[in-house]
Image (cartoon, rainbow, N blue to C red):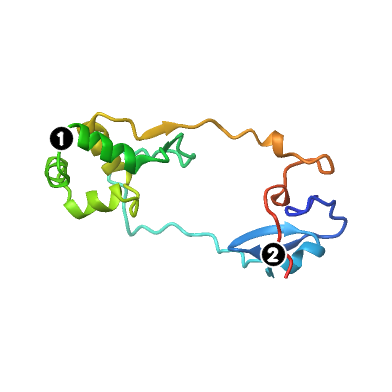
């Protein structure tokens, strides 16, 4: 197994270390960058209770937890402001049309607030603009180092020494 930070081959048992909220398997040298974790207590298996009976209704279908394939464009605030101005709408008028507060429009246009998906759809529909863009999967092969078999956190992060 390789260290998830430096990529070195770990001959002994890898250490589980928590670094910035993420638990990783690392070598002895890299364990100094975080807090060594104890083995987690295994949860007891849950037993079914008859407290909630199945009424025969079809269960809701949930979307998969895959990463979304669309993200908000980087200059969304400028796009929104320019589209609003091109339609000769004031912030108050736009807020009225999409049933939002004027302060929300102000904060979004100034870049102090990122709109949620529901609000993004309102802007797209009312201003006839595209705020969500599809992104391709990042090609991680270009970051691969010659010394290791795979990509490690160390390939992306520059570690500052104190």
* Nearer to me, 159 or 67: 159
* Nearer to me, 76 or 138: 76
Which class describes the residues within 10 Å of circle 2: few (<14), some (14-19), or many (20+)? many
Residue 7 relative to residue 103: left or right: right
Q: Residue at x 64, y 63 (%)?
A: 19
Question: Number of labelled discs?
Answer: 2
Residue 133 relative to residue 97: left or right: right
* Nearer to me, 130 or 138: 130
Q: Residue at x 88, y 56 (%)?
A: 11
Sequence-wise, the earlier of marks 1 and 2 is 2
Q: Is residue 142 above or below residue 53?
A: above
Residue 95 relative to residue 8: left or right: left
User: Which numbered disc, 1 or 2, marks the residue closer to the eye?
Assistant: 1
- Position in image of residue 61 (x %, y %): 36, 38
- Position in image of residue 7 (x %, y %): 79, 50
Disc on res. 88: 1
Q: Residue at x 56, y 63 (%)?
A: 43
Q: Quadrant of residue 133?
A: top left
Which class describes the residues within 10 Å of circle 1: few (<14), some (14-19), or many (20+)? few
Label pair 1/2, CB-CB below 8 angstroms: no
Camera sees residue 78? yes
Which residue carries the number 2 mark?
17
Q: Quadrant of residue 27?
A: bottom right
- Position in image of residue 49 (x %, y %): 39, 59
Residue 56 relative to residue 71: left or right: left
């Amino acid at each position: 197994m390789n260290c998830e930070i430096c990529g070195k081959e770990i001959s002994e048992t890898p250490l589980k270390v928590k670094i910035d909220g993420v638990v990783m398997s690392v070598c002895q040298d890299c364990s100094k960058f975080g807090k060594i974790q104890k083995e987690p207590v295994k949860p007891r298996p849950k037993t079914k209770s008859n407290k909630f009976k199945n009424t025969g209704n079809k269960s809701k279908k949930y979307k998969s937890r895959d990463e979304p394939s669309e993200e908000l464009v980087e200059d969304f605030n400028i796009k929104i402001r320019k589209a609003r101005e091109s339609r000769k709408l004031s912030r108050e008028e736009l807020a009225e049309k999409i049933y939002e507060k004027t302060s929300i429009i102000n904060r979004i246009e100034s870049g102090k607030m990122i709109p949620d998906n529901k609000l993004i759809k309102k802007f797209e529909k009312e201003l006839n603009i595209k705020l969500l863009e599809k992104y391709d999967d990042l090609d991680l092969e270009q970051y691969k180092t010659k010394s290791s078999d795979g990509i490690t956190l160390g390939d992306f992060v520059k570690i500052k020494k104190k």
